[in-house]
Image: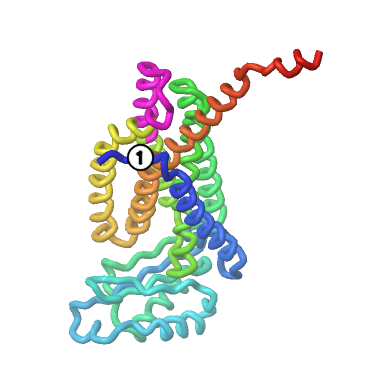
Amino acid sequence: MKLSINKSRSLWWAISAAIILAGIISMVISWQQPNIHAPLRPGLDFIGGTRLQFVRDCTKPGNCDKPIDINAVREVAKAQGLGDSSIQLISENGAENGVLIRSKDLSVDQRTNLQNTLSQQIGAFDPQKNQIDSVGPTLGKELLRSGILALIVSFIGITIYMSFRFQLDYAVFAIVALLHDILITVGAFSILGLVAGIEVDSLFIVALLTITGFSVNDTVVIYDRIRETIKINPERPIAEIVDDAVNQTLTRSINTTLTVLLTLSAIFLFGGETLRYFALALIIGFTMGAYSSIFIASTLLTWWRERGQSQMVESLEPIDTSTSSQDS
């Protein structure tokens, strides 16, 4: 079956615009939330503080018979002056037997007191699974600044590379496709932050950079096929050339993407809390990268080249001088 992407390019653009708009609306709402004040819910890496993860020891008889009451955890935190902390239940062995608390900076005594009080309320914890991390706000700001700078530098580098290897319009639409992937991934995590309380950390920036490299690689493959076909058949309609280039590379794109997504799905399901949302960001970004390379970057290039050809034809049309001759 031959895919004719340019016949329905308005549909592809409308789908992308709707998804991006939903993400932007979510980011605006998130920014207005008093407990977030950012487009995405920031994690410990960016705002600083203490993150405590306690998991119950289910090897002890009766320790995990009852589910954790999150209200009881909140009451304990409130009694210790940590009422504004972010508290989430986490899954362990298919059940919510752990609790994740993100709070302001805590001293060693405060952490120990909180752990002991929670242990009395919800059950004994497994010391091998407990995690306590602390990050200062200065380091958090530096991480955010470095991550944004890395994204900007990568975009500039890709633009220069694409301009030299292809032409400027190729580079521009490749960057548009990359922005498309980044915006959708960021928008998705903004929605997840509002709905499920999912936070972004430094690994999220790493995921965005990885998405950028994967997406532009797919786009380069299609663009390379378009360029070679134009050299052989320069008079052929650009829409046909692009459709053929997409169809010739479609199997490769699908196979590559599916192979990567299978690996990422395994990491998401079995990689633990630390890597779960990193894998989710890559799953969203890689899926959108394959989509944008085929349905956004290619169709935009077709639209731009058709627009340029129509303007050239109009400028070369002969002027009808018969009327002016008769008047004279």
Q: Disc 1 designates what residue?
A: 4
> Is residue 77 left or right of 327 when viewed as pictured?
left
Is 220 rendered above or below residue 232? below
Q: Is the N terminus in the top left, top right, bottom left or bottom right quadrant?
A: top left
Identity of the residue drawn at 42% across and 81% down: 73
Quarter of image, res 233: top left
Tell me if 169 is positioned left or right of 284 in this view. right
- Residue 169: % across, % down: 52, 28
Q: Where is residue 266 in the image (x, y as percent from the top left)?
A: 23, 55
Residue shown at 45% from the left, 53% from the top: 15
The answer to which of 194 and 81 lies nearer the viewer is 194
Q: Which of 195 and 144 is in front in this view?
A: 195
Q: Can residue 157 be seen in this view?
A: no
> As displayed, is residue 27 above or below residue 114?
above
Residue 53 at what x, y percent from top left? 37, 69
Above or below: residue 239 compared with residue 165: below
Query: Does any portion of residue 158 appear in the rendered image?
Result: yes
Q: Which amino acid, mark 1?
A: Ser
Left of 308 or right of it: where is 254? Answer: left
Q: Quadrant of residue 6?
A: top left
Label 1: how many Cα within 10 Å (few below 14, some 14–19, many 20+): some
Along the line of sight, which residue is nearer the eye, 58 or 305?
305
Question: Residue 28: image x %, image y %?
Answer: 59, 61
**Quadrant of the rendering where the C terminus is positioned:** top right
Residue at horizontal 39 percent and vertical 17 percent from the top: 231
Q: Is residue 236 magenta?
A: yes
**Extent of the magenta region:** 219-241
Give the farthest residue toward the right: 328
Let me know if residue 199 is in the magenta part.
no
